[in-house]
Amino acid sequence: MPVALKESKEYGMIDGKPISATSQPEELSTLITAFRSLRPAIVTLDGPAGSGKSTVGHQLADLVNFLFFDTGVMYRAVTWAALQRGIATQDQVRISELAAHLPIDVMPAAVQETDGRQCTVIVDGIDITTQLRTLEVDQNVSIVSAYGVVRQTLSGKQRHLSQYYGSGQAEKDGIVMAGRDIGTVVVPEAPWKIYLDATSNERARRRYEEMREQGKNAELNTVLKAILQRDDLDSHREVSPLHPADDAIVIDTSSLSPEAVVRQILSLAYQVISQKK
Ligand code: DC
């Protein structure tokens, strides 16, 4: 069984004082105000599929008026474009060329969008946001995201986005950027790095429930197998494999609600920010 965060659990030291998840029972508004003083206003949120990055990232970003950006959509957009063009995902040369030249526009969702999206993704002049999570894209995206040139190209775009939104001068006050290598490779200088994890069984259960809610047919065992396969590909690829940054705070979300995880993040950040003052 995974160990959930405990009362006394410490997350390292800052200026000789330990930081812990629960030692500051501050008002949420106090935590939010402190968090919004982060500069650059960049939070990295890495972890495996189903660890809660999207749910937690959305909630956190909404609370502090940051943009939530899930970098997985960029790898999915290249995969979608390859499938559209009939390019085999095993063809590394053509996929790399495609990634280098494909204009991918990502923008905060317009107010009138009602499908729960935070970002809109435009490729080939088409809004492909709702086409990024099909089974076909799911089955091919780990292959595409293992190519070094693809990663280099997309990491560069992600870095630009983080600088733009992290400056606090954009339409949002900062950015919560989710992925697999954001704290380790894309923005290693980010002031606040989170790595979410959960047991594979719990992550499969969450995906299974999500699929059922969307009316998709799924077997829990098949979903678990797919999760384990993706973990294996993401963690063992040569370029930017999935692992927590040395200075990331690792939170096991297996037995925590998204709200509890958000509060943990805010209260840990509050301690670090207050101790640094
Ligand atoms: O988070 P997701 O399931 O939408 O990610 C899709 C794929 O993209 C997944 O196989 C991991 C990969 N990915 C990555 O390698 N690096 C990122 N920063 C984001 C996603």
Image (cartoon, rainbow, N blue to C red):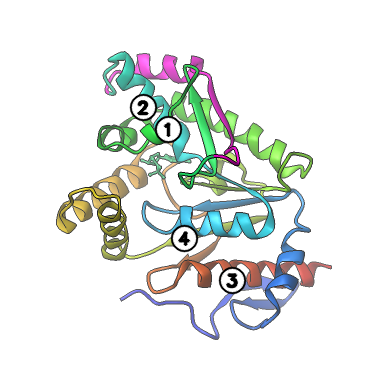
Badge 1 marks a residue whose secondary structure is: helix
**Vertical placement of residue 212 versus 139, above or below:** below
At label 3, counting other C-alpha atoms closer than 10 Å, the crowd grade (few under 14, some 14-19, many 20 or more) is: some
- Residue 235 is covered by the magenta coloring: no
Residue span colored magenta: 90-112
**Vertical placement of residue 196 versus 31, above or below:** above
Q: Nearer the viewer, residue 96 or 120?
A: 120
Q: Is mark 1 within 8 Å of ligand 1?
A: yes
Q: Which residue is mark 3?
A: 263
Labels 1 & 4 near each other (Cβ < 8 A):
no
Kind of residue at disc 2: Thr
Nearer the N terminus, badge 4 or badge 3?
Answer: 4
Viewer-side label of 4, 3? 3
Nearer the N terminus, badge 4 or badge 2?
Answer: 2
**Quadrant position of ligand 1:** top left
Labels 1 & 2 near each other (Cβ < 8 A):
yes
Residue at left offset 21%, top offset 52%: 223
How far apart are the alpha carbons under marks 2 and 3?
A: 35 Å
Residue at left offset 22%, top offset 48%: 216
Labels 4 & 2 near each other (Cβ < 8 A):
no
At label 4, counting other C-alpha atoms closer than 10 Å, the crowd grade (few under 14, some 14-19, many 20 or more) is: many
List x then y, in percent, for residue 133: 34, 38
Q: Which residue is mark 1?
A: 75
Residue at left offset 37%, top offset 51%: 49
How far apart are the alpha carbons under marks 4 and 2?
A: 25 Å
Tell me, for residue 79, which label it has, or none: 2
Q: Which residue is mark 4?
A: 196
Residue 146 in view = no
How far apart are the alpha carbons under marks 1 and 2?
A: 6 Å
Badge 3 marks a residue whose secondary structure is: helix
Quadrant containing the N terminus in the rendered view: bottom left
